[in-house]
């Protein structure tokens, strides 16, 4: 005896599946819309360009925005060359051997290491052992390690999408392997690499845990003057003003969250658009 | 002639540099592990190994200090299991809906929205959690505080869903359409086909999705620190404040003296986290590779 006939089971199941998709997607839309609505009134030119005043109870978030920009620029400058080279190794040079397998395992593991563990490592190596102190340079280095897997996997994907014939044609004309990679493969893969870099920037801009132990300052009355100074950063600032300071005007919290989300989602959106245009325009 | 030799030397050097940057990834992971192990080892010079792993008290600043990570480990485990129970069925159902049920256009809209969720910084989700899920849990269960393990589980379930959905989708994509067609031809309904043909065929990919979701949840720090109340006690219920391993490191490292026992103990927690996520990720990756073959 069956509890439900197959037809009814089918109907019930489809309703349940549709509902679960709604349960997942609706909150996402709500969160983003909610932050936009609540945060928008707080945004003004002064909010974006002034220092926090009165124990962060008023004023702007300028140093946090600038700090995040510094940290992220440093991180991408460090990780982009290494990430691209590792991806070139994996797609163009690697043979099927144990070394290659180990490199792949390392990258997968790097992608899965909890962000706070990166923070610990950055603290132990950059801040203490290399004596950079709690500083921008230690924070950028730590973030750069974290976004390496993002850049590597995007670059790998872009490089392997370049047709084999391109390489063969170049080699047949007498170009060396590196000339082929430099003049033919990399330019064709550029949009894909760019996508990876932008996704990496977005990821680095939103992370709190790695900079918590290596770079971030609770409050600084001035902008950082050298790469060995501490910085304020947007995600850490949001953490501070939403948990550490009681009785704060909620407007400032929503405004900060909005600025952070616009930067991060803006980056992601740009990356998605580049990828989409690239796929459409591909000449091969 | 000399130009040709020059070119060859150039080629050789570039090849070595590229090989080296590949090797750097291995060195990096080894270095992270070495750092965690080195500093954990310093702890075990003064603290008994078993007192650390099985100790029921985490009193890092009392005198004498006690570094038992059992409450933190169980806190992480409890929240993770709760999150898995919520996110796995939802994530899998959502992926099945996108791949097998929804019209193509709907799927194309839903996918980037879920991708956006993965991009929202965890501190923003934590902030939203504090003003939405925390009061919700508090009111529904009539508690004195909404900062509980359950709150953390709901928060983390939500954060793990994008990874579970996209990996499950990949797994569903590998199921050949001929299998489905054969099932339809035998008169099975769509639902019967999904349950009896598609899901079993994609099962190892789905298991990989669950594993990687598990790793993601275990390592999450900021959001979980903001919504779970951070009480380092042995958890007895879902509706009490707990503290995870990740939150402990993030919350306490700022106040430690470098190279003190407390500092080393936090590194030892880092080593436990690293080892756990390492194993989970390798098993997940192994499963994914097996399907691709």
Image: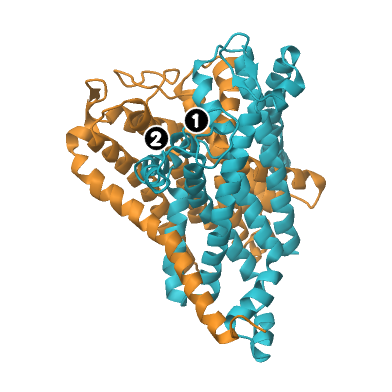
Chain colours: A orange, B cyan
Question: Are there few (<14), some (14-19), or many (20+) residues within 10 Å of tag 1?
Answer: many
Question: Are there few (<14), some (14-19), or many (20+) residues within 10 Å of tag 2?
Answer: many
Position of the C terminus of chain B, as image quadrant, is bottom right
Residue reaching furthest to the right: A98
Q: Position of residue A29 (x, y in %)?
A: 36, 57
The chain holding disc 2 is A
- A273 vs A207, nearest the viewer: A207
Q: Mark 1: which secondary structure?
A: loop
Q: Which residue is drawn at 55% across and 75% down?
A: B100
Q: Residue at x 41, y 36 (%)?
A: B145
Residue B92 vertical placement versus A79 (above, below): below
Tell us which disc is closer to us: 2 or 1: 1
- B251 vs B180, nearest the viewer: B251
Asked if residue A183 can be seen in this view, the reply is no
Q: Where is residue B143 in the image (x, y as percent from the top left)?
A: 42, 40
Q: Position of residue B96 (x, y in %)?
A: 56, 69
Left or right: B234, with A263 as reference point = right
Alpha carbons under labels 2 and 1: distance apart: 20 Å
Q: Mark 2: which secondary structure?
A: helix
User: Same subunit under labels 2 and 1?
Assistant: no
Asked if residue A159 can be seen in this view, the reply is yes
Q: Name the residue under label 1.
A: B230
Q: Mark 2 points at which residue?
A: A235
Residue A124 falls in which quadrant of the image? top right
Q: Position of residue A215 (x, y in %)?
A: 46, 24
Position of the N terminus of chain B, as image quadrant, is top right
Residue B69 vertical placement versus B138 (above, below): above
């Amino acid at each position: 005896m069956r509890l439900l006939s197959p037809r009814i089971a089918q109907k019930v199941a489809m309703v349940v599946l549709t509902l679960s998709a709604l349960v997942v997607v609706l909150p996402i839309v709500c969160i983003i819309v909610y932050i936009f609505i609540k945060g928008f009134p707080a945004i003004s030119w002064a909010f974006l360009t002034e220092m926090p005043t009165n124990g962060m109870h008023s004023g702007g978030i300028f140093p946090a925005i600038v700090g995040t920009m510094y940290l992220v620029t440093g991180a991408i400058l460090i990780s982009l060359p290494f990430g691209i080279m590792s991806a070139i190794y994996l797609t163009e040079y690697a043979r099927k051997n144990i070394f290659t397998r180990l490199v792949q395992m390392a990258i997968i593991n790097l992608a899965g290491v909890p962000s706070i563990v990166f923070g610990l490592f950055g603290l132990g190596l950059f801040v203490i052992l290399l004596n950079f102190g709690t500083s921008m340079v230690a924070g950028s280095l730590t973030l750069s390690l974290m976004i390496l897997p993002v850049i590597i996997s995007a670059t790998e994907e872009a490089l392997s999408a370049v047709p084999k014939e391109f390489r063969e044609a170049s080699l047949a004309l007498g170009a060396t392997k590196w000339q082929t990679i430099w003049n033919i493969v990399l330019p064709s893969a550029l949009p894909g690499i760019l996508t990876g870099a932008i996704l990496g920037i977005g990821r680095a801009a939103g992370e709190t845990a790695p900079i918590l132990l290596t770079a971030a300052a609770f409050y600084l009355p001035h902008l950082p003057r050298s790469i060995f100074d501490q910085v304020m950063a947007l995600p850490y600032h949001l953490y501070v003003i939403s948990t550490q300071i009681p009785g704060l005007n909620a407007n400032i919290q929503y405004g900060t969250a909005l600025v952070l989300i616009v930067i991060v989602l803006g980056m992601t959106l740009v990356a998605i658009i580049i990828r989409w245009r690239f796929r459409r325009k591909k000449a091969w | 002639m000399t130009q040709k030799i020059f070119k060859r030397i150039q080629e050789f050097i570039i090849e070595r540099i590229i090989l080296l940057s590949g090797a750097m990834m291995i060195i990096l992971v080894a270095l992270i592990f070495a750092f965690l192990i080195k500093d954990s080892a310093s702890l075990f010079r003064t603290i008994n190994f078993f007192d650390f792993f099985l100790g029921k008290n985490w009193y890092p600043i009392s005198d004498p200090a006690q570094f038992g990570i059992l409450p933190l480990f169980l806190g992480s485990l409890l929240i993770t299991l709760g999150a898995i129970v919520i996110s796995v069925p939802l994530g899998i159902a959502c992926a099945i809906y996108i791949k097998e049920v929804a019209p193509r256009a709907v799927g194309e809209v839903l996918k980037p929205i879920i991708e956006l969720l993965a991009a929202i910084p965890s501190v923003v989700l934590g902030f939203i959690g504090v003003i939405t899920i925390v009061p919700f849990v508090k009111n529904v269960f009539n508690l004195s505080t909404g900062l509980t393990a359950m709150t953390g589980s709901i928060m983390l379930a939500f954060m793990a869903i994008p990874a579970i959905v996209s990996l499950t989708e990949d797994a569903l994509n590998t199921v050949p359409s001929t299998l489905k067609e054969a099932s339809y031809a035998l008169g099975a309904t769509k639902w019967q086909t999904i349950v009896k043909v598609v899901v079993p065929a994609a099962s190892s990919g789905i298991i990989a999705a669950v594993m990687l979701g598990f790793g993601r949840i275990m390592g999450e720090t900021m959001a979980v620190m903001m919504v779970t109340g951070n009480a380092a006690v042995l958890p007895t219920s879902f509706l009490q404040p707990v503290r995870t391993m990740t939150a402990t490191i993030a919350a306490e490292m700022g106040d430690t003296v470098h190279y003190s026992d407390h500092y080393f103990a936090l590194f030892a927690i880092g080593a436990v986290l690293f080892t756990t996520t390492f194993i989970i990720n390798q098993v997940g990756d192994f499963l994914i590779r097996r399907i691709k073959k």
